[in-house]
Image: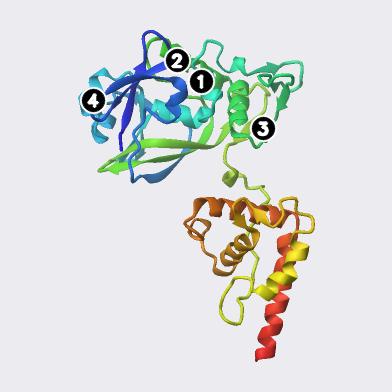
Amino acid sequence: MEQTWALGATAESPREIEIVTDSGVRRVIPIEQATQWGVPKPAKVGRYVYEGDFASWRVEPPEAYLAGLGFAKISSESRHQVFTFDVSPTLTAHVPALALMRAFFKPHYCVLPAIFRPASLDMLSFVDYGQDPPTVVLDHVPGQARYLGPHRNIHWERAILWCQLSLSARKMAWSVYRNALEGTLGMNLSVGQTRVVLHGVRRGGDIFVTRAALSQVIVPAEDSLTGAQERYLFHAGVDLGRKEVASVKGLTIPVRPDGRYEVSDVEWEQLEPGFFAEDPRGRQSGRHSCRRILDLVLFKISSGTPWNRVTTDRKLLSAAKFAFRRWTVDGRLGVALELLTAARSCHATAVA
């Protein structure tokens, strides 16, 4: 698999970056493609979680990072910042700026490209100071303007919200363009407590990060335009108050007397009329039958197998997870489980 490294922005345009492959081939790509290119993608990586502020992070020459991932020959030409910090007294992490940009501004079609323009995120939104506290308005949608709140579920809108209402995050977004004008891929870091999941390769006493994901940011009151501490969530898993709409927790289903979990022909005859009575999708969900999908859901519930091991067919897995959530919300799964549990329990009692 071809590995690439972003050398920096081009002299002609701050919205284009020059990349080099591990075989030495160079080319220029638009910033929109920087969501996929510019940071190596090793096959095997570990996962590390950083929680804290960025006060201990420092910018150091990229030689160690590039040597660790096989790009040592071009280290002297790189204009791509690499941040380092000590995970422990014996372990140092190396994080390229582009990996942080992807995490902070999300690999979205409008946010990441916007920060490489002079107006930055003001192209997409503005702060309405007429509101108390000030509120961010998303105004790039033709014909409408939307007010954004801290708890919206759209990740790229949260990035806009955070970078508009946090003074230091706003400076961070603007710093990307200023650095690009000088040919550098780099950024200032914001203040506040963050939780960042880092994925990378560990070699000896070093972790070479290739991908990052922002989970949450806590902005102190003195850095917030609202005048109060704000908590921005980028991943539902860190929301302690989140109510799981569809979860297998607490769900059980007995297996059939023959030890199988699938619905039998007799059971399906009982389930089918009510199961699809108000289903506009009918008896087929895409190219998969709903009976097949229900069988997978029952297998998941009865065995406790992780979703990614229920089936190797990715499209079928996606259909099963979507159906599980939809059927849980509209109550059909609960009705089906009650009917199947009653039928199988009665049969087991009769056999005994």
Q: Quadrant of residue 327?
A: bottom right
Q: State the separation of the CA atoms marked 2 and 3.
A: 29 Å
Q: Quadrant of residue 75?
A: top left
Decide which of tag 1 and tag 4 comes sooner along the chain.
Answer: 4
Q: Residue 104, how many percent across, how many down?
A: 51, 29
For discs 2 and 3, the disc positioned in front in the rendered view: 2
- Is the Cβ of the residue at disc 4 closer than 8 Å to that at disc 3? no
Image side of residue 294 versus residue 305, left or right: right
Q: Eyeballing the image, is 94 above or below 115? A: below
Image side of residue 298 versus residue 329, left or right: left
Residue positioned 58% across, 20% down in the render: 167
Residue holding disc 1? 113
Q: State the separation of the CA atoms marked 2 and 4.
A: 22 Å
Tag of residue 150: 3
Q: State the separation of the CA atoms marked 1 and 4.
A: 26 Å
Residue holding disc 2? 15
Q: Quadrant of the C terminus?
A: bottom right
Q: State the separation of the CA atoms marked 1 and 2.
A: 8 Å
